[in-house]
Amino acid sequence: MEQINNIQVVPCTSSNYLRPFRVHYNQNGTKKSWDFMQTHDSVSVLIFNTTSHCFILVKQFRPAVYMSEWERSKPKPLQPSEEESAEATPAEPKVPEEDKAGETSEGTSSHQPPASAGVTYELCAGLVDKPNLSLEEIARQEVLEECGYDVPVTKLRKITSYRSGVGVTGSKQTMFYAEVSNENRVGEGGGKPQEGELIEVVKVPLHEAMTFAFDESIPKTMGVIFSFIWFHSNMSPKYKISTNV
Amino acid sequence: MEQINNIQVVPCTSSNYLRPFRVHYNQNGTKKSWDFMQTHDSVSVLIFNTTSHCFILVKQFRPAVYMSEWERSKPKPLQPSEEESAEATPAEPKVPEEDKAGETSEGTSSHQPPASAGVTYELCAGLVDKPNLSLEEIARQEVLEECGYDVPVTKLRKITSYRSGVGVTGSKQTMFYAEVSNENRVGEGGGKPQEGELIEVVKVPLHEAMTFAFDESIPKTMGVIFSFIWFHSNMSPKYKISTNV
């Protein structure tokens, strides 16, 4: 599907996207410090097409997932512990060694996993970065931009909210459920190519959903699994769904 | 519960915990870049005590969650858009303004939320940072250290795995289910105080679990909600559970 090559990894000294802060505080009289990052809250939407009885997901190449898979696929030689290594060379990138060293940037290393290793299935989702819009309005925009369905705000049902990345960002995610029909389909979706988004819209038939959710060979977020099982628990009186969890 | 004060936030120029990298790559012939962070994979464990019919969770103060709540609680005056602001002053911390400016570090600002705003309920969990141990062995250690239960590795059942923080870290999380009884309880749990951990072990009775899961006034991770609903779907033949989702 995707062709990924010419991979180069460099330390990132200044980023508009990842900006670490350190907070010093006293907890019950004990001095502590914690490094964290400020991010936007986010919304995600479980979309169910009542015409085709399919869930509508998005699928995209995620560089962070790809790099994580690459690192995991590397043989682990005898090394100093991660902690020691981190303390000794805090600014030294550890992935991927072959590109870092500049030996090759052609992506031809035997270590390099296929592009599919970085492609994940996710709920339609977006950042809460427009102060004048409600969560529902932001969710609606994402459904339109990413998946091509025009769904009224009133048809968005909040499933719940929770804290994400509690160790690093602590942002709040709110999950919605939206029922759409083929009549709501007004475009192709796919995100905003001008912003570098390259999103594929994917249908998962209802009767395959639970098998899909628990198939670990299909990389996906917990949001997909949780929302499918939520649908199974809450919508089963309305829609038949396979129960082979 | 927690006393949090003397809060100071500073930009974090070098961290052993948050180390941003930038990857340059070609996707289908188009040059792209992405900022990401390398983190460890992790495990989490849904613990069910068959003696007391309670789930065993952990509860702790999370600085990243607290700072995120603080930022969210601040009034949003008319400002340049987040993007413009980020580009203009990429190294400038945005939270919390009053501490950043050094006006007061006493934590007495009217903006400062109560410590409880940063306390989250989570599954027992830990990083996969010991190359010689299996995921099950790491999960077992965390159950012992954080919750005080000694559960044999053979009693850990894998629920599933998924990708976490796909935009930033892309790490892999594996979730286990462990049934324990009061007989497995060998200690108090609470984590490693010498490593700064201050973890409270919390019981959630089975019959309150689904209400707890969907009560948004109780800050928690998606893992808690997902695992409770998974239990509801998979263990209901074995254990009675309230269905008021």
Image (cartoon, coloured by chain):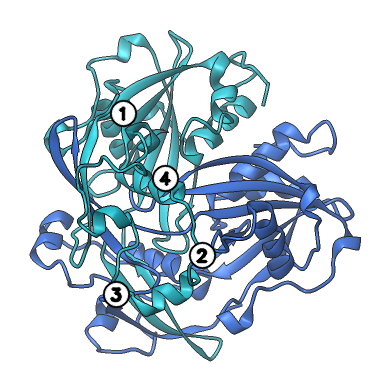
Chain colours: A blue, B cyan
**Sequence-wise, which precedes: disc 2 or disc 4?**
4
Kindly report which numbered mark, 4 or 3, lies closer to the viewer in this rendering: 4
Q: Give the residue at x 30% y 20%.
A: B149
Q: Are marks 2 and 3 in contact (CB under 8 Å)?
A: no
- Tags 2 and 4 on a common chain: yes
Give how far apart the Cα atoms at labels 2 and 3 are: 43 Å
Q: Which residue is mark 1?
A: B143
The quarter of the picture where residue A244 lies is: top right
Q: Secondary structure at mark 1?
A: helix
Q: Determine crowd level at label 2: few under 14, some 14-19, many 20+ residues with C-alpha closer than 10 A.
A: few
- Counting from the top left corner in percent of width and height, residue B158 is at 46, 37
Q: Which residue is mark 3?
A: A96
Q: Amino acid at mark 1?
A: Val
Q: Amino acid at mark 4?
A: Glu
Q: Which residue is mark 4?
A: B69
Give how far apart the Cα atoms at labels 4 and 3 are: 35 Å
